[in-house]
Amino acid sequence: MTELTDLTVAEIRDGFRAGDFSAREVAEGFNANVAAAKALNAFIVETPEKALEAADAADRAKAAGEALGALAGVPIGMKDLFCTQGVQTTAASHMLEGFVPTYESTVSGKLWAAGAGMLGKLNLDQFAMGSSNETSYYGNVISPWRRNDGGNAALAPGGSSGGSSSAISARLCPAATGTDTGGSIRQPAAFTGISGIKPTYGRCSRWGIVAFASSLDQAGPMARTVRDNAILLEVMSGFDPKDSTSLDLPVPQWEANLSSDLKGKTVGIPKEYRPDGLNAEISAMWDRGIEWLKDAGANVVEVSLPHTKYALPTYYIIAPAEASSNLARYDGVRYGQRDLPDGAGLQDMYAATRAAGFGPEVKRRIMIGTYVLSAGFYDAYYTQAQKVRALIARDFELAFEKCDLLLTPTAPSASFALGEKQADPLAMYLNDVFTVPASLAGLPAMAVPGGLDAAGLPIGLQIIGKALDEQTVLNASLAIEERAGFSARPDKWW
Amino acid sequence: MTESTYRIQGATGEWEVVIGLEVHAQVTSNAKLFSGAATAFGAEPNTQVSLVDAAMPGMLPVPNRECIRQAVRTGMAIDAQINKWSRFDRKNYFYADLPQGYQISQLYHPIVGEGQIAITLDEKNPETSTKVIGVERIHVEQDAGKLMHDQHPTSSYVDLNRSGVALMEIVSKPDMRSPAEAGAYLSKLRTILRYVGSCDGNMDQGSMRADVNVSVRKPGEPFGTRTETKNVNSVRFVMAVVEHEASRQVDVLEAGGKVVQETRLYDPDRNETRSMRSKEDAHDYRYFPDPDLLPLELDDAFLEDCRQSLPELPDAKRARYEGDLGLSAYNAATLTADADTARWFEALLAEAARIQKKGESDVAKASANWLLSELYGALNRLGKSLEESPVSAGEGAELLALVADGTISGTIAKQVFEIMLETGDKPGRIVEEKGLKQTSDTGAIEAAVAKVLADNADKVEQYRGGKEALFGFFVGQTMKAMQGKANPQVVNELVKKALG
């Protein structure tokens, strides 16, 4: 018999309903895996009791013949950027160490209401700022994957949703939430051989998610299959009057409408995504992806997104600008850390609290953001970046006149060793080069695994869709999933 | 339009003062600008605070439609351009009373553009003393909380009740030229806000306060360097700030110094302004569009609804009182200076016209006179406001009707009114019970006249000798003899007749 913890979300859901196993058995299985995987450092807080509580509720509801929620019997991991009532929420920072919200984020609340149980709060890059999960105050998350070179180098699970990606690929949870500001769902998914979707900006409420960059932040699911992502996204999406930027639209039935038949669809291949010096294996994977989509019935055309090269600098102006303001509330006055040196006044308290409460990457971005918004630089940086952002969005609009979706690599390389890029922020920022443009344009985009590189590490593909057209994104990803037949999993060493 | 002749006499000649006001008016609304929290004044500290107001992690602002509506209505009331597209910006700075670390305001695209407010300096001569003051803009923003330094020997406390309360910042052009103009502008603005109902205008409770920008120049020269005196909370203080600050600047300039562009504070106890911070220490607020909020777009139906909901405004009302009701300019101005007074007057007027079966214009003068002299006199004496008046508009109208139809004289009416104030009884009942109805019984009056003339034969002689002013004396004595109850017209006639 297959281990319960190897099942997908859909399999757990259906098996539980069919009576093949109880929700409690599933929760206990994952709780055991979580407890045995401390070496991965994927969780900041483990909540086995929460997982069991939800499982027991599901079992009781089923026994009583009551209606079951869409995720009844399914335990998941929750990125520690989502505020969870009564459970510490830190954004992986020292600043919020010990902070226990009195409220539940809209998205996590929807998941619990659908019957999901919480296995724990997943580690991440501090305040979601990072691409390797090395900026967490609670230590690096380790990828369960290792190179096949016999070495034992600890690899990055990607970031910022690195706890989520690591936990899913190691079978600590069948699915998890992520958030994506410039690639924080897609890049870690690619690094760990799982899939994850960032929906159209506004699909998921941002209420109760610790903010990084408001105009870019979007929640989304991460899981091992496209179908699982569709199931979770349906639950997580929907209008929220508490978020002014939330879209007041009905939630489509993405799972029911999944189809890998792409006849009549045209796939655009943006030529600017194939720069000189692109990693050969990434490039080859991309070519394979093109063949798979053709095989699924799609036409393929080359398109141009001429402002792509400005996307990364634009992102690294806008995101820090918003972050510098969003993180001003962590001042030691009302909650979280407070450092009050002897005889300190208000300004000293701010300085001491923020010096101790934020890690170096967070400070770097606050300083960049403060700089680009300051008098005399605002127009040259922020205003200019907003203009370029509009041009990037326009690039996509024009491209989508010729095609229905875009196929690109997700990340410029497979996972790298922890520590390898930490000393060079720019090299680290380059990880987001393929994911950032869709974030700036607010478009739905999904990472799906394609295969392993020569070192035995997963590499993946990215599908970018038109605004609100998550269905096509999911369908094309499904077509790739079926053809890639990605079944590799990391050998358990932890 | 009149030109101010207000000048400061300096050693080097005359100086003109230039004034602009930035008025912060708390929007009348049950809930804050971006959160559902309540806004009651005087509540226990930190009892009117939502998660959004305390800037808890992950909390987001959602604009309160009612606050937006009030700002638009205010804009319409000053004949201003309403911007159908506006946007919120963040003003970033750290302070313990500012939980978000930024104030949500509107720097680049305010909701209301240019408008104007007419002020009148001499209500008795409105034609020659009216001036139009330009309004630059109105924008909507959040208020901050409050620090309390007197609760603990070494710590300060923070009260977030006001944090997130909606304010309108109403920015005038630098169009005022005297303390009187600044005072009149602020009073008029307060009147308009109260008419519209968008702000209660209670400056003593902090729901309205002014930043006073003052500069001086030699007449005809370009604007001088200005100072801004913050948070001045009464009309009188605003006028005092202008006066004080203008003379201070003249002194500085005439001593060969320069006026420093700075923020100042007014100390009402010592009647002086003090430097708070200079331009060099000014914050870099790093304004940028709030990414948590979409631009504010107003549709035509919303604007139409705002327009329809506007009441008759003070200038229009005043013109109507003068033109249609025939009131004096001064009375019209006094009755319309305050929305509550006008409302009370109109209730009195409507009731008086109804009881007397006359048009409002036929009863307007008597109603206005009674309200402004009798009722106001009594209220002043009792230390009560119009809202607390022991006599209702309906009872007042009843009293006026008794005079108008000759049931009682004006003199008796004063007595009846006093009794009404004391007992709360209705005027008709008082007249009935106390037997105060005036008499037109010529027989009784003739007898009284005859007795008065007989008792004052000397004065009758003098009258007949040409001292006609004594006529009033005979009338008065007769009225007195009749205990005020005689119809004065009949008395007049009979006295005249008896004196031949």
Image: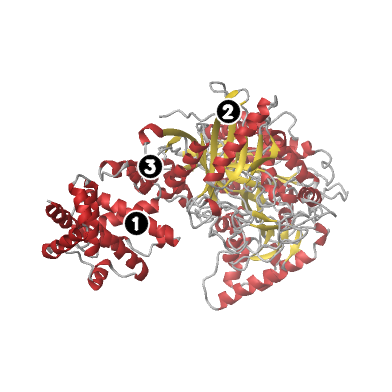
Q: Nearer the viewer, mark 2 or mark 3?
A: 2
3 and 1 marks in contact (CB < 8 Å): no
Q: Earlier in the sequence, mark 3 or mark 1?
A: 3
Give the residue pinned by disc 3. B300
Q: Residues within 10 Å of mark 1 (few under 14, many from 20)?
A: some
Marks 2 & 3 on one chain: yes
Give the residue pinned by disc 1. B374
Q: Nearer the viewer, mark 3 or mark 1?
A: 1
Of B305 and B125, nearer the camera is B125
For label 2, the SS is strand
At horizontal 64% and vertical 54% (from top left) the residue drawn is B146
Horizontal and vertical percent position of residue B274? 68, 41
Q: How many marks?
A: 3
- Kindly report the distance in space between the C-alpha atoms of the residues bearing marks 2 and 3: 52 Å
Quadrant that contains the N terminus of chain B: top left
- Kindly report the distance in space between the C-alpha atoms of the residues bearing marks 3 and 1: 47 Å
Rendering colour mode: secondary structure
**What is the chain letter for disc 1?**
B
Side of A491 relative to A107 (left or right): right
Horizontal and vertical percent position of residue A173? 70, 61
Of B316 and B392, nearer the camera is B392
Give the residue pinned by disc 2. B9
Side of A40 relative to B24 (left or right): right
Horizontal and vertical percent position of residue B465? 19, 46
